[in-house]
Image: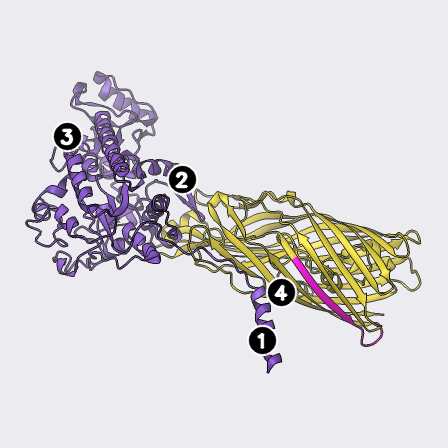
Amino acid sequence: MKKTLVLSLAGLALASLAHAGSFQINLQGIRQTAMGGSGVAMPWDASAIFFNPGALSRLNGMEAYGSAFFVSPNLRYVPANSGTTSYEPQKETSTPFAVYVGGTLRKMPKLGLGLGIYTPFGSSVNWGDDWTGKLITQSIKLQSVYFQPTVSYAVHERVSIGAGFVYAIGSVNIHRALPLQFSDGRSGQLVLDGKASGFGFNAGVHVKATDKLDVGLSFRSGVNMKVDNGTATFTVPASVSPLFPAGNTFNSNLPLPNITTLGAAYRFTPSFLLQADVVFAGWKSYDSLKFDFAKNTTAVANSSSPRLYKNTVAYRLGGHYKVNDKFAVMAGGAWDPTPSDDKFVSPDAVDADRISLSAGLTYEPVRNLNIMAVVNYTTTKARSVSYSPENFSGTYQIKSVTPGIGISYKF
Amino acid sequence: MKSTSLKILAAASLFAACKPNIEGTAPTKGSADFSHYTAIGNSLTAGYSDGTLYRSGQINSFPNMLAGQFKLVGGGEFKQPLLPGESGWPGAKRVLGPVTGCDGVTSLGPMLYPGARDTAGSSTNISNQGPFNNLGVPGIRATDYLIPGYAYGALLLGGVGYAFRMYENPAVVRPIDVAAKSNHTFFTMWLGNNDVLLYATRGGEGQASGSGPSDISPLPTFKTSYKAVLDTITRKGQKGVLINIPDVTALPYFNTIPAKGLVLARQGQADSLNAAYAPLGIKFAVGANPFIIQDGSAPGGVRQIKDGEYILLTTPQDSLKCAGWGSKKPIPRSFVLDATEVANVRNATQDFNAYIRQMADEKKLAFFDVNTYFKTVQSGVHYNGLTLTPVFVTGGVFSLDGVHLTPRGYALVANKIIQSINDTYGSTIPDVDITKYNGVLYP
């Protein structure tokens, strides 16, 4: 029963090209997304479990929170020297979500407790089985869901700290054509399918520096997502099938990067606030994507595709204006540089420097119940790059409009 | 009303804003005129593959690929003298299949196409369907272009009538006359391969300079003929591409059976060969040994093959495995390209290529140095996930005859030709997508 639940959650958590560097997804809170993704300095709601566990103990009571986004990025690839040829992956909608339950206890208001379930990384691209890059990738789907029980404590009237343990589950599914052709010209195919898991933590400090200024710092550790005994299915012409043993399996690991965020929020008036975050992502750990097969033959060798990611620093800025007791509006923007190297952008992980603009509103129809909505627009400039190991070069562009909705209830 | 159209406008602009707006660049023709393209050449131009000519091979000829791209910049129809069938004409094509050797071991290898032959109508003269844009004639040498009645002669000499079926008045016409009738504005000319290749693929049994079917063409004759063809097809100032002659020793035809291919598993085998060859002072050891080859000038008429000498792909495998070829008996000289013969091939290739280069410079034509390019392919070409090498069968570039290309190999060549056209004439003709063309197919 429990397992079924976990699997169905994972099924929802398909993610996307649309948000933040590479396969990182920054859609863990409606308010924060509406403010350019910033939010480490303010305990807006129970999503503090994700944004800054240190701020959880600043909540006023317990809260249940749920949000979902509808992500369907538009990607286009124009191969180099190909005239007006262009390719777009199949349109897919994924729904990254977040669920938080947490806050402070009535009897122990300095103590915050909570559980967060969210989807901080993922990627899904389906170029189709017969496009020009089919021998590099036909489709790839990476999913992850983090479970994070969290404790927070106000150690001082102005300072609170918090930390959560992260258990991550995920899955990988990759389809790729093989350069072995059947007698009718069809290409062979490799399908890799596996479940992944990993551990990590999320810790933070929140400081109410003055009555107007809040400051926050959070550190989400890297999580090494390990795939053990995933299935590797080779579909090849019969005459070469002895070289591709049936029932093969593979191991792999995907190092999800650590993320350090420093931010501040300043109340200019009782109803108007600006906040900004600086986000450091430790992508350097993602050096190559490796697959080790259990049964190696002359035709089935372990593979390693260089990625050579670089660490990045992103900037996020947003404002919040409380219109009246029921309504508030938010707007913001972000600059998210890509961790990928110009010579190592593979069509299975297309990325570029992103500019993102967003706006949102919250509505409190009855006391303690909040309905939240946001829309985000993310765009990249045209990026002319290559995946040099395969001489795969061309120009990519990503654009997306992403709506999200959420609901929270204080109890 | 007004607000509705505003809403539609707003919706449309929102829709536009979330779609990527990058576009490729529209192809341009530069200073060349591609409206009527004619291809001059031999089997490589005709689309010959897997040891024969067949319809889909012709459709995947590099000139047909080029014509497809030329259409993007004003190119017209490209007519080829297509055969009716797929099985190969006159001989069956080679396909991969289970081949059982004399030792009873079955392995995957090239075999003649086992299916029904669909050659009916292949030998019919179809010149009334012309004029053809692809004038590639398998087997033709540069020096054949000035021979009256070449097509008829080639037929009588045991040639297969590739020219015969497409030429008007084949009994009298010279190939150069056919080229002269072409009304082209642009051309490719890949000629001269057979002036060296036929000598090499027959083990260097012909003359190093002669006009026989296994000879290397004499340099002065080659030059006269090559220049005459080129003068003819550029007489109206037409632009085009010259392609030179690849060093044939880079082909899998000469590199698949290794010179040190005599592998002795047991000491006993080495001992008995040592005893047999003791008078000649040839020694054998367990492991890989050079094959024994026939050589009239060596003591006893046999010797070990040396580095830089080649054994032909056509050497019967069963004779090597079970009849003692290369060990107890020498490999006949017609299956070996020895050092002198290799030098003859290399020298002729160098001389012919120097002349082709000179002609390209003189006439200010685009030039593709396929000779140098094929040498770079030795270490593997990466393209969109493909790794292409000259290795027989698995490399994907060369077809199952070890000399001619797969569609994928021809596509590789087409793109290099396009590059040289773009560089010379300032055009921006796009590449063909190599992944759309077949390599070697597996059953």
Q: Quadrant of residue B377?
A: top left
The span from disc 1 to disc 2 (Cα, nearest Å) is 54 Å
| Magenta stretch contains residue B285 | no
Along the line of sight, the residue nearer the viewer: B127 or B288:
B127
Display colour for chain B = purple
- Magenta range is A356-368
Closer to the camera: disc 4 or disc 1? 1
- Chain bearing tag 1 is B
- Chain bearing tag 2 is B
Q: Is residue A263 above or below residue A372?
A: above
Residue A39, position as x, y percentages in the image: 77, 57
- Chain bearing tag 3 is B
Q: Which residue is mark 1?
A: B8
Q: Residue at x 49, y 43 (%)?
A: A389
Which amino acid type is marked by label 1?
Ile
Find numbered disc 1 in the image and state the secondary structure of the residue it sits on: helix
Display colour for chain A = yellow
Residue B312, position as x, y percentages in the image: 24, 35
Q: How many marks?
A: 4
Find numbered disc 3 in the image and state the secondary structure of the residue it sits on: loop
Q: Give me the disc on residue A411.
A: none
Residue at the far bottom in the pictured view: B1
Q: Which residue is mark 3?
A: B209
Q: Is residue A411 left or right of residue B277?
A: right
Q: Which residue is mark 4?
A: A401
The span from disc 4 to disc 1 (Cα, nearest Å) is 18 Å
Closer to the camera: disc 2 or disc 3? 3
Asked if residue B402 can be seen in this view, the reply is no
